[in-house]
Amino acid sequence: MRHVIALDVGGTGMKAALVGPDGELLHEARRDTGRDRGPDAVVASILDFADALRAHGLAEFGEEAAAAGVAVPGIVDTEKGIAVYAANLGWSDVPLRDLLTARLGGIPVALGHDVRTGGLAEGRIGAGRGADRFLFMPLGTGIAGAIGINGVIEPGAHGSAGEIGHVVIRPGGIPCGCGQRGCLERLASASAVSLAWAEASGDPEADAADCARAVAAGDPRAVAVWQEAVDALADGLVMAVTLLDPRTLIIGGGLAEAGETLFTPLRAAVEERVTFQKLPTIVPAALGDTAGCLGAGLLAWDLLATEVSA
């Protein structure tokens, strides 16, 4: 059976699959990145994992994988196939595409940014299916974004399109690691809500999920923390709507797991803020933590399609 290798590299773990032409997951596997052993060990782990997937596909389906798609965090030069920088993995300027191509017997390899790759999957086969323009925003440790246009993710001139987490929403506000103050991700990410709720509740172990449960229970302290995050997120989304005019806003990540505790007040807050803008549909992401892996598979199939058409 014709298939491709899909690999989603995270800060601590890797998710992988062999993917059929129709997007079917034929085989799934997970491994640690081994980042505690340094960046060279991480690269070695990726290459070993990819090679193991190649061997499994050959044994199971009687043929080599046709291509591979790999999603990695940090700054990525997709054109040159270089993993430029990732703070949580410790690497810089890794020619990952060439290394993988050599390890996998010369098959074509597509390298993508983790959030944009996840956004590709959500847009094509997930919550954004059928939308010609969408914005995918995972609310996790930070906030990033993927801008979808007709089934393709817009990378930007320098590979940095969609970094909505570093739009300043509260000028002069909380310092951000990027060097600015008042960035959206310092106010509305899952980690930001966790910090705010830990302080408000007096429990240093409390997190965003605890805050959401306290909101549902009617705790006024939690409601205040939650509303502050929702207001900041709504301000950021209205800015995005004004600039991009998306048909669908797809919200994912840990904070979206709160369900309607998040989406009901968020939809209301965005609606209150729009004036001339067209209100997009605001929906939760559908693919969960498989989005990056599914997107990597799409990158691989897209690469094959491009080579055939060329």
Image: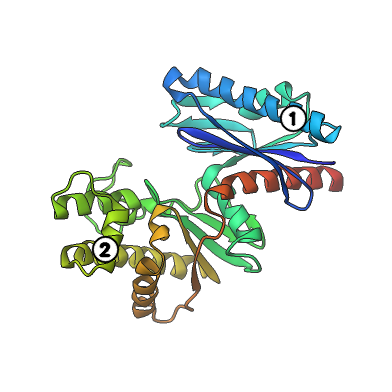
> Toward the viewer: 251 or 12?
12
Picture residue at 66% right of the left edge, 30% below the top: 97
Q: Secondary structure at mark 2?
A: helix
Disc 2 marks which amino acid?
Trp
- Residue toward you, 272 or 18: 18
Q: Between tags 1 and 2, which lies in front?
A: 1
47 in relation to 196, above or below: above
Which quadrant would residue 235 be assigned to in this image?
Answer: bottom left
Which residue in the protein does label 1 denote? 56
Task: Give the residue at the far left of this rendering.
Answer: 202
User: Closest to the observer: 186 or 64?
Assistant: 64
Q: Disc 1 vs disc 2: Cβ atoms closer than 8 Å?
A: no
Q: Which mark is residue 226?
A: 2
Upstream in sequence: badge 1 or badge 2:
1
Left/right placement of residue 87 relative to residue 160 reads left
**Is label 1 in a helix, a strand or a loop?**
helix
Residue 87 drawn at (x, y percent): 41, 31
Residue 142 visible to the viewer: yes
Identify which amino acid the numbered label 1 is placed on: His
Q: Say left or right for 238 vs 76.
A: left
**Residue 173 is at least partly visible in this image:** no
Residue located at (15% from left, 55% from top) = 200
